[in-house]
Amino acid sequence: MPRTNEEILAAVEEQGIEFINLQFTDVVGLVKNVTIPADQLPDCLDHGVWFDGSSIEGFARIAESDMFLVPGLESFAAIPWDRDAGYPTARMICDVYMPDGKPFAGDPRHILKLAVEDAARMGMVYQVGPELEFFLFKTNAGRPAPDPHDAAGYFDVSTDLATHIRRQMVRALAAFGIEVEASHHEVALGQHEIDFKYGPALRTADHAVTFRTTLKAIAQQQGLYATFMPKPIAGINGSGMHVHQSLIDLKTGKNLFYDANDPYGLSQIARSFIAGLLAHAKGMIAILAPLVNSYKRLVPGYEAPIYLSWGRTNRSALVRVPRISPRRPQATRIELRCPDPSCNPYLAFAVMLKAGLDGIRRQLPLSEAAEEDLYDVDPRARKLETLPGSLGEALEELQRDEVIAAALGPHALERFVEAKSQEWAAYQFAVSQWELDRYLPRGGGLRPPPRPTPTPKCLQSKYGRTLTINRASATCAAGDQRLDRAGDLLPDLLRDCRGRVRRRLALLHQRDGAGRRHNRARARAGWRHLPAERQRPDHHAADAVPRRAAHRGVPAAGRGRARSGGARGRLWPGRLDHPAGWDAHRRYVRAPDRRRPDAGKLSNVTLDEAAPGA
C-alpha cells in the first residue's frame, strides 16, 4: 500500500482512478463517506475535507458542526466492483478532526487509538483476529427476505450454493489488502464465515469495517443480500463475531500470554486479562452486542454464551482458551465469544482492551475454569452470573461501569446511550406480529397458545435442542433435519426412550381406588389427555382413546399389557391438544426418571403457525 502523498498520487494516475471515497464511521458503526474527484486529492492530502458533523449519528450538535476529515495514507485501495461498473474509485479511511486541529473525541477510530496507546505505555501491542459470520438471503423485488440462499450445513459441499460467491468475496477482500485464511459454510441454513488474518487492533478494525461493506457489495451483484444481523431467523444459530486476542511485548515481539508451566499454557498476564474481561463483561456487552436483536442470539442452546465463565473445550463459556501447541507459543490467545458482527469494531476492540488492561493493573484473580456444558447445569450451584438479557439492561450496566465509560469518553458514551435508548424505546412501543398472532381473537374468542410439546433429551444428539412443527403442513423439522411428518419421530422415540417410557408407564398405571395417585403421577410427568368431546375415534380407530378411558386417564390397551412392557403400552395413544384443522397424528412421550435429578430434561418444541412458504 502507498505510504506517502507522492505514492498516493502516482497510484491514482497509474490506475486511472477518477473518484476518491473518504470513509469514516459514526458512533454506532455505520459507514459514512464523502466522495471527491481525483483532481481534488492533492488539496485533500494537504488540508483535509470539511463536512457538517451535526448530521452524523453521535457526532456534533448544530452549533458545533464544522469538522474535517484527514485520510490515512496506508488505507488507500481501489474498489474492485466500482471499476467493473465503469467508475474507477479508490477508498481512504479517515480520522475526524475539530476546527482547532484536535482529534474529535467522538470519533470511534480515535477512541481505539487512545486504548492502543494506553497498552503501548505498558509495553504491549494488542493483537486481534475476529471471525465474522453472516447470512446470505434471497431478495424479492430488490428487498431482502428472510429466506436462506441454500439449505447447507456446517462445512457442507454438495448443498453449498455459495461456494463461488465466497470466492468472489475473498478475491475482493484481497484487493483491499485483507489476507483471508479460510472460508466455509456455517451451521445454520444460508450462514457463512470468512476468517481473515489477525493483526494490530487498529488495522484489524479497519479490515472488519471493509469486510462488511465488501461482502454486501458482492452479494448485491449476485442478486442476494448479506446481513450481519445477529439473529435473523428464530430457531437456528445466530451470527457471532468471536474475537481472538493476545498481547505482544512491544520490544521483543514475544507473546505475553504464554507460559509453558501453566496447565492451560497461560501466563499470569493472560489470566488477569481474562479476569478483566469477565469483570467488565456486563458493562461492555452493550457495545459488543448493540442491537435489540442481539439478545435473541444470546440465549441457551445455539452456541452463544450467556454465563460469565471461561474454559478450554467449552464453547458455552464466555471466554474460551484454544489449545496451544508448545511448538507455536506465539499462537497463544483467548477467544471472547459474546460480540456479534453488528457492533462497531473500533469501539468493541477499545472496550475489550481497556477491560483486559484493568484486570492486569489490578491483578484480578481468575476463577476456576468451567469445562462442562453450562446449558445443562444449575447456574445457582456454580454461582455463575449471566449477561444482561436485553438491550435496556445492557445500557444500564454500561452506565454503571466506570472503566468502560472512561474507555468511551463522555461524548461517545452520551451519544451512544442516547441513540440506543431511542432504539430500545421504539422496540418497547412497537406491536410485533408475534403479539398479534398470539392475542387477537380467532374463531370467536381468544385462543390460548398451545403448550410446548417436549422432546426427550436422549434425542438431542440426533435432532438438536429444538423441534419445530408446522401446523399448516403437518411437517416438522428437527435441528437441521427436515421430516415429512411429525409421526416420523415415533421410531426414534421407541428406540431411544424405551427404558424411560417403560418405567414411567409402570408408575402411571399403579392407581388407587379413586385414581388420585395416578392423576398426580400423570401430572408430574407432564401428560395430557383430550376431553371426550375432542376425541376423533374415526380418524385412527386403533389408536383412539374411548370416552371412559380418557376420563379416567387409562390407556385403552389395558393395564396388564402396559405393566408387562408390551409394545402398545409403551406409548400413550391419543392426540395432541391442538386447534381443529391440524390432522397430523402425533404420539409423544415424557418420561423423566425421578431417581436421577438430571434425567428427563427436555427441550421445548415450538409450533410454527405460519403456512408453508409464508
Image (spheres, rainbow, N blue to C red):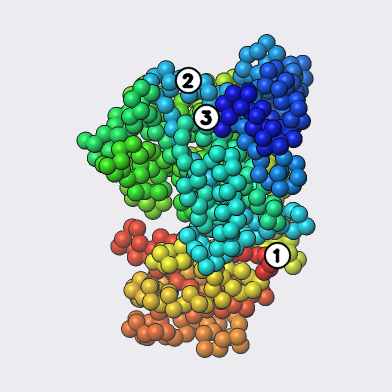
Could you classify mark 1 by the number of other residues whose Cα lies within 10 Å: few (under 14), some (14-19), or many (20 or more)?
Answer: few
Q: Residue 117 carries which label?
A: 2
Could you classify mark 3 by the number of other residues whose Cα lies within 10 Å: few (under 14), some (14-19), or many (20 or more)?
Answer: many
As displayed, is residue 411 above or below residue 222? above
Q: Give the residue type at disc 1.
A: Ala
Q: In which quarter of the image is the N terminus?
A: top right
Q: Position of residue 485 (x, y in %)?
A: 56, 76
User: Residue at image x 69%, y 30%?
Assistant: 22
Along the polypeptide, which appears first: circle 1 or circle 2? 2
Q: In this view, does 252 lie to the left or right of 129?
A: left
Q: Give the residue type at disc 3.
A: Leu
Which quarter of the figure has residue 386?
A: top left
User: Residue at image x 74%, y 34%?
Assistant: 19
**Which structural element holds mark 3?**
helix
Q: Give the residue type at disc 2.
A: Glu
Residue named by callout 3 = 202
Residue named by callout 1 = 614
Q: Where is residue 584 in the image (x, y as percent from the top left)?
A: 59, 77
Q: Where is residue 414 in the image (x, y as percent from the top left)?
A: 63, 23
Along the polypeptide, which appears first: circle 3 or circle 1? 3
Q: Is residue 211 left or right of residue 368?
A: right
Which quarter of the figure has residue 607?
A: bottom right
Q: Is residue 254 left or right of residue 197?
A: left
Q: In this view, does 328 lie to the left or right of 470?
A: left
| Disc 3 and disc 1 in contact, CB within 8 angstroms | no
